Amino acid sequence: MSTAGDEGDRMTLLRFVERFALVLREAGMAPMPARVLAYALADDSDRYTAGDLARGLDVSPAAISGAVRQLVQVGLLVREREPGTRSDLYVLDDRDLWSRFMSAELATLQRFEDAVAGGVELLGQDRPGGRRLAETRDFMAFLRAAMADAVQRWPAERDRLAAERGAGVGA
Amino acid sequence: MSTAGDEGDRMTLLRFVERFALVLREAGMAPMPARVLAYALADDSDRYTAGDLARGLDVSPAAISGAVRQLVQVGLLVREREPGTRSDLYVLDDRDLWSRFMSAELATLQRFEDAVAGGVELLGQDRPGGRRLAETRDFMAFLRAAMADAVQRWPAERDRLAAERGAGVGA
DNA sequence: CACAAACTTCACGACTTCGTGAAGCGTATT
DNA sequence: AATACGCTTCACGAAGTCGTGAAGTTTGTG
């Protein structure tokens, strides 16, 4: 009977994976990396072989291969190697996961800023188009600074939240 | 001779449009809306008919039709109607353009948060996966608050920048 | 009232992208 | 040293998406 419960858990897990992956895709992530990230985040284990992920998500090992490479490249997954085994282990280093995720986002924002700054150079600030571009560039810079600041403040804020809740539960 | 210069300007403009549109696409925007937005932002006029955009970008009116509808829907473009003409006018209300753009982004972030919160409900916080999800949710909330705050501060910051530069040029 | 212009909608063709299946390669076991 | 296992790469088939061309609709003009 315990199997039935486990299978139910697995189904709810996979449903959530699909739902969360959809949001990630809308934010620009490719489908398979989105699924792998969602799965690694929500499943209870904290280290997975490629085979684990393939079986857990019920997709081909080939799909996993590409997905984890992309995730490793952007720093959302870390590849580890246990001596005496032939499988790589992928671990979701959740301690600074989202700070790292946001760092990638900040790089994107930087590219925005560069592209717009290039446009300002090309068009000059003495024309309406150039002025709009310049203001856009300033906004990007402002926003990027604000986000970088928030990312930096996050660890302390997280610890504060944890302490607060720990105290609340204890009381 | 002025024609040659104008054509050169037009070419540099279109090159910039392509470059900036590419960045916008990487951020999740559809190709044609990205081009239209980049063009409307960088070109010197501040109101365009659909025909202006089609000719300016050298694409079919049909492509413009879908693109402007999407841009109007997310609030990046405003549709206006001059009495006594048969064309709608699309204006890029640049005063609060980026605040509005960020509001849409904040909505996306809210969907993130909702999806993750749903996962926390499904999985419970007494399991490693659920705990990771809960921390993710908290991070999303924290980041969203920081971004909302930044968006709110932007108008004042922009005016401050403008005043500063105006003074700098004068000195 | 008829005509003309502009935009919109629709359906098609081209392109890109995604995930699978099969073959190849590296690595530990025996 | 040979074998078996797991991952990776490659090429293919399928699905979704994008922009064009043509027809239809609405709106202003003569």
Image: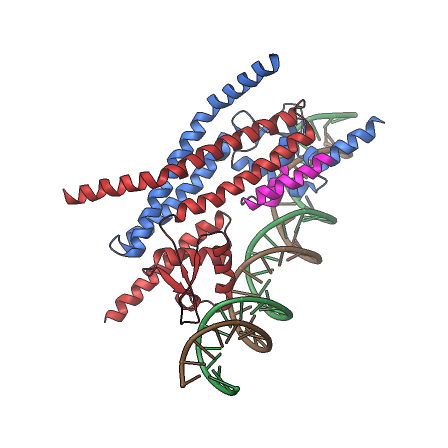
Chain colours: A red, B blue, C brown, D green
Residue beneath the point at 54% across and 33% down: B76
Q: In the image, residue A9 lies at what x, y percent?
A: 30, 62
Residue B14 in sight: yes
The single residue placed furthest to the left in the displayed view is A171
Examine the structure image and report whether residue A36 is included in the region drawn in magenta.
no
The quadrant of the image that shows the N terminus of chain A is bottom left
Q: In the image, residue A149 lies at what x, y percent?
A: 42, 34
In the figure, residue B59 lies in which quadrant?
top right
How many numbered marks have been drawn onto this rendered protein structure? 0
The single residue placed furthest to the right in the displayed view is B1
Residue B87 in sight: no
Q: Is residue A167 left or right of residue B12?
A: left
Q: Is residue C7 above or below residue A104?
A: above
> Which residue is more in the foreground, B9 or A109?
A109
Q: In the image, residue A72 lies at what x, y percent?
A: 48, 56
Residue beneath the point at 62% across and 31% down: B41
Q: Is residue A33 above or below residue B143?
A: below
Instruction: Give the main secondary structure of the magenta stretch.
Output: helix
Q: Is residue B165 left or right of residue A51?
A: right
Examine the structure image and report whether residue B25 is included in the region drawn in magenta.
yes
> Which residue is more in the foreground, B65 or B74?
B74
> Which residue is more in the foreground, C10 or B27?
B27
Residue beneath the point at 70% across and 37% down: B14
In the figure, residue B37 lies in which quadrant?
top right
The quadrant of the image that shows the C terminus of chain A is top left
Q: Is residue B161 left or right of residue A116?
A: left
- The boundaries of the magenta stretch are B12-37
